[in-house]
Amino acid sequence: DGGAADPGDPEGYRSRLHAAWAANFLSYLVVSTSRALFPKLGIELGMSATLIGSILLCVYLSLVTVFYAFRGLIRFPSSPFAILAGPLLLVVALTLLTLSRDVPSFVSAFLVLGVAMGISYHSSLFHSLLRPGRAALRSGVHETMLGLGSLLGPICGGVVVDHAPLFASAVSRVTGEAPRISSLKSPYLFCLIPVSVGLTALFLYLAKEGRQDKNPPRKTSNGLFV
């Protein structure tokens, strides 16, 4: 939110808003990379099209579960922990994707990825719509961040596969897999860099800007949060 804070905003609201946008960007960067490039990896591993689609479905199963579980929640989505939980789970999911060799491992990785995506999306949208005034502008920024992540993920992942053998070599040394498989997994290792840097930056930013407000937002009779 580029303008003045809304009247009555608790201390730390704007810092949490900006951090939630950044976390949402990271989640869509990773999800779009995985969604675009995993099918090729699955084919190389001998998976059928049905199995590949079923594994990718796990992202959205856990995503829907998070949305349903978070309905009506106020305290958790408004906390810095919710903002940091998404990128932290992204690190777990990317590590699993890099090391996975069998279907159960990939299923676990994509389930975790869906949870991370759901938490970050919900937190970003929650903060964007939390306060009256300029909510339309803030929700537009929320959508822009996920759009940018979705745009950059497949492009960066494809470039890493084709032009960054260093990442493939690193994966091969860790997993001992064939060069082609390691190359197709290299985008997951690459994504660990911006996600890890982003997680550290978000933690330091939130710690600097202020702790969670001790008086969490409450809903008034007209449906607004104050």
Image: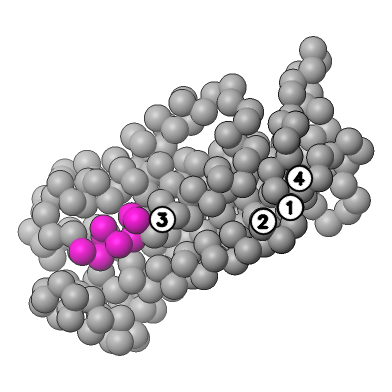
Q: Earlier in the sequence, mark 2 or mark 4?
A: 4
Give the percent coordinates (x, y) of residue 141.
70, 52
- Residue 181 appearing in the image: yes
3 to the left or right of 37: right
Give the spatial CA distance, label 2 vs label 3. 19 Å
Between disc 2 and disc 4, the foreground one is: 2
Give the percent coordinates (x, y) of residue 17.
70, 48
Q: Which numbered tag is attached to residue 206?
A: 2
Q: Secondary structure at mark 2?
A: helix
Q: Earlier in the sequence, mark 1 or mark 4?
A: 4
155 to the left or right of 17: left
Name the amino acid, label 1.
Gly
Q: Label 2 near label 1: C-beta < 8 Å?
A: yes
On screen, residue 174 above or below 152: below
Q: Earlier in the sequence, mark 2 or mark 3?
A: 3
Give the spatial CA distance, label 1 vs label 4. 9 Å
